[in-house]
Image (cartoon, rainbow, N blue to C red):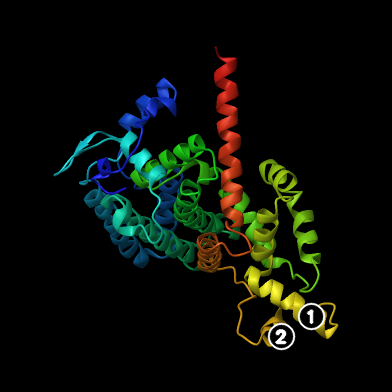
Amino acid sequence: MEENATEFEFTPVSIDSFFDKSEIQTAAIETGITILTKNQEQLVKRLLDELHKSAPGRVEHLEERLRKVEKLAQDIALFPSLLERTETNTSVRTPEELVESLVSYHEEGDTLLQLPSKATLGKSFLVTKIHTFYSMYKLARDFTDMDEKLAKAYMDETISMMLTLMAEDVYMDIIRDEVINKDLRREMALSLIILWEHRSDQTIADIAPVLQSVWEARRKIAPIFGTMMGTSELMQVSMQMDVQWVQFMKGRLSDPDVSQAMEEFLFGISHEQIQRLKAILKEQGVKNIGRDEVSSYLGERVKTDIAADYRDFYLLFTVRRDNARVRARLHFDGPKHTLEDHFIRFVMEQNAEKQRKDSVAGR
């Protein structure tokens, strides 16, 4: 996965197998980090216009911050594109080789030092953008006359980028899961490389509102520990959401790994803590308890209350992600993937199936 990817054993697969001809041309031309999407450009312009009218003293600071974001992107753009054939100091790297090295890498542990420099630098760029748009949300809310709905657009964009940051971990987990079909893992690897190259991801942008809605529903629901009443509530709310999420719930919730991942997502504590809590409540003859009682019954501090802050969203995802990776590595009971892993995989599989059907129909 590093620049000397030719050290790995792999069978080269042409990128043509993942794209139709028009997409290949687009992928070859559109290289480099996306500084601002069209929607982000519109949000920036609208906020600057509003600040010029209501808080002109805030304009210069925001413009300076945006210039720093642009400068960071320009510096990262000096590194070779991951979507083009590149000669490094020791070898020649192609996108096909990078895909295969990602799919074929089997070592455990943090892969930070195995990744291309552009991948690690780009993550810092994305985090910088996330913080910038969150500050824009606060400016829109506190220093302009925008109504709540307009100001919320800046928070929505912040969360969408946070989900793109999260997607990098999700893609990596799926790529390294040898149980999954290798062709799908190759498609995930290519999606990850495109994410590294542009620091934006259309699949995640499309499903971001769904995941945000699920998170909001999860935050507002007060599950009753000791029963699964909270899950029923979430399912009822879910059935009013996006078609893909409904299909996912109907089609995958019978999978034990998915249902256990759902429990962790809903209750905000680990699978191990859930099982221990159920045993304690059964032993003491207690039918159910509220969120604020969980810590005392478990004898340890647990965070079950969730704020609206997007950083809480990401923080709790990383806890569930790390726990799932440990279980997979040590062959422990419990979910080996997060709920987000399962949903994004489901969407990618649906998209791949649609592409195959469209391809057959077009012949």
Identify whether 188 is placed above or below 280.
above
Picture coordinates of residue 31, whole percent (x, y): 31, 37
Residue 268 seen in render: no
Foreground residue, 36 or 215?
Answer: 215
The CA span between labels 1 and 2 is 8 Å
First in sequence: mark 1 vs mark 2: 1
Foreground residue, 145 or 122?
Answer: 122
For label 1, the crowd category at 10 Å Cα-Cα, with few meaning under 14, some 14 to 19 and many 20 or more, is some
Residue 170 seen in render: yes
The quarter holding residue 288 reads bottom right
Q: Image quadrant for the C terminus?
A: top right
Indicate the secondary structure of the residue bearing disc 2: helix
Identify whether 157 is placed above or below 8.
below
* Residue at x 58%, y 54% (from the top left corner): 340
Picture coordinates of residue 159, whole percent (x, y): 51, 57
Three-letter amino acid code at the position of disc 1? Leu
Mark number, residue 281: 1
Mark number, residue 297: 2
